[in-house]
Image (cartoon, rainbow, N blue to C red):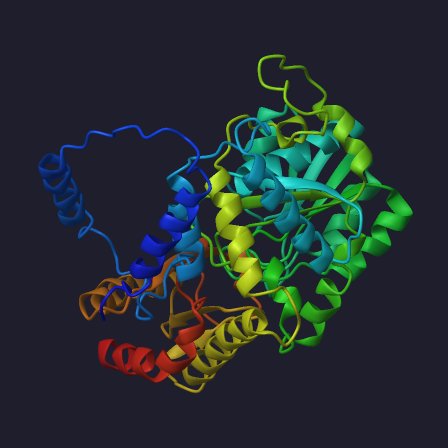
Amino acid sequence: MALETQSLNILSEAIERLEEGFSNLPDHDVELDLSGLRTVIFEAAEKMHDNFPYHHPLYAGQMLKPPHAIARLAYMLAMWINPNNHALDGGRASSAMEKDAVAGIAQMFGWKTHLGHLCGGGTMANLEALWVSGRLNPGKKVVASEQAHYTHNRISEVLHLPFQSIPCDSRAKMDIDALEKVLENGNVGTVVATLGTTAAGSIDPLPEIIELKTQYGFRLHVDAAYGGYFLLADNLDAAARSAFDRIGEADSIVIDPHKHGLQPYGCGCVLFKDPAVGKFYNHTSPYTYFSSAEMHLGEISLECSRAGASAVALWATLRMFPLQPHGKFAQGLENSRKAALALFEKIRSDQRFLTAFPPELDIVIWVPRLEKASEISARSNEIFETAARKNLHLAIASFPKTMLVDNWDIEWDQEQVACLRSCLMKAEHMDWVERIWQILDEVC
């Protein structure tokens, strides 16, 4: 499989079009050591061989998805200017493009008014959301499921906010009864609901959490960094559909365009339903805010310098693939889910394996069928390594006994079990399920 290079001709033409916008400036020479440049860039290319083939459909391990050609081209095009979206002085066009792109994401969630911006990634986006929650509920506890991303615990420590994990049920979802017991004890300021856990792709029961919000009055933050775009997919199961249909009732939402949004790293996005939370960002910076009275993105962001190229890439992608149900972008998500369901059915029907629960998005979890948890963990790692030697790249994810004890009749001689995990997040994975299964069959 060759890396895509046909689009480079379009990039060259686009750079010429960009240059036309500055044709009134006097010429200036840029000296380049082309020989040295060639030597170093080829050395970099050689070193980059030491990577897994993230771009190929046989890579089905971690959440690594290559950016679409339009995002790659737009990002590189912006690099000839290198705008900084902290202040309008550093990125007038790219700041406008960021506002437009973020508004498009907010509209996908049903928000006509919002406050939001792009971030370096989901960690920074979640930090800003929990920081605002902490300002509104100072000293109160942040709670999230045991399968929520570890960043919430870490961020809470950074913000000096107490944190508590909520146990999960047998499908890796937040246990509602356990959540309510914690809420009854009081002092909970924020509940984090995860729509697409990073290990299993599970969807927390958002409708039930919203009902508890009505009773207990906490702030609701939805971490949809991984799963948020699946709102557009029309082949979700009933529980996932009911959760995504209520996502607009959250107080804040995080989504990562650099996951399913076809973008290069790093591109995260944080959204607040109430624009009034912008008051917490208030600061002065006289050396950057001098050319416009309009609000700069740096005035609603904890980050200062931010890559304007990320905004240009996202804007261009949304122009080519609007965030619409039944559109081409949505169909790509649906194909990823179809691929996961197809692989799951093959694994579930094979007596050599045990499955935990059907995928809700595009992540499949399974183990080899053995008697003991320790034997399962050891064999999972063997399959992982052997499959990689045949160019099928899977992942390993550890899950607790408490979550799986009701699913599997095995001897639990250890508290954690290592499971095999496939993340089928490329739309073309649907065409590669048979090949993936063929290799997995050979390995086992």
Q: Give left or right: position of 433 versus 151.
A: left
Q: Is residue 270 visible?
A: yes
Residues 335 and 319: in front is: 319
Would you place residue 378 above or below residue 430 in this image? above
Q: Nearer the viewer, residue 314 or 262?
A: 314
Q: Position of residue 111 (x, y in %)?
A: 78, 53
Please state the horizontal and vertical placement of residue 157, each as a whole percent of the image: 58, 27
- Would residue 348 appear left or right of 195 to someone viewing this image? left
Percent coordinates x, y for residue 186 in the rendering: 82, 36
Q: Residue furthest bottom?
A: 349
Which quadrant of the figure contains the N terminus?
bottom left
* Residue 133 against residue 257 in the figure, above or below: above
Instruction: Give the residue drawn at x 36%, y 72%.
Output: 370
Q: Is residue 444 shown left or right of residue 408? A: left
| Image location (x, y in percent) of residue 399 | 48, 56
In this view, 225 is above or below 229: above
Residue found at the very far top of the displayed protein: 286
Q: Quadrant of the C terminus?
A: bottom left
Residue sticking out furthest to the right = 215
**Drawn side of residue 237 relative to residue 180, left or right:** left
Residue 267 is at least partly visible in this image: no
Query: Which residue appears at 62% of the width and 50% of the height?
Result: 101
> How many numbered marks appear?
0
The answer to which of 337 and 115 lies nearer the viewer is 115
Q: Residue at x 45, y 61 (%)?
A: 412
- Front residue of this view, candidates 175 and 410: 175
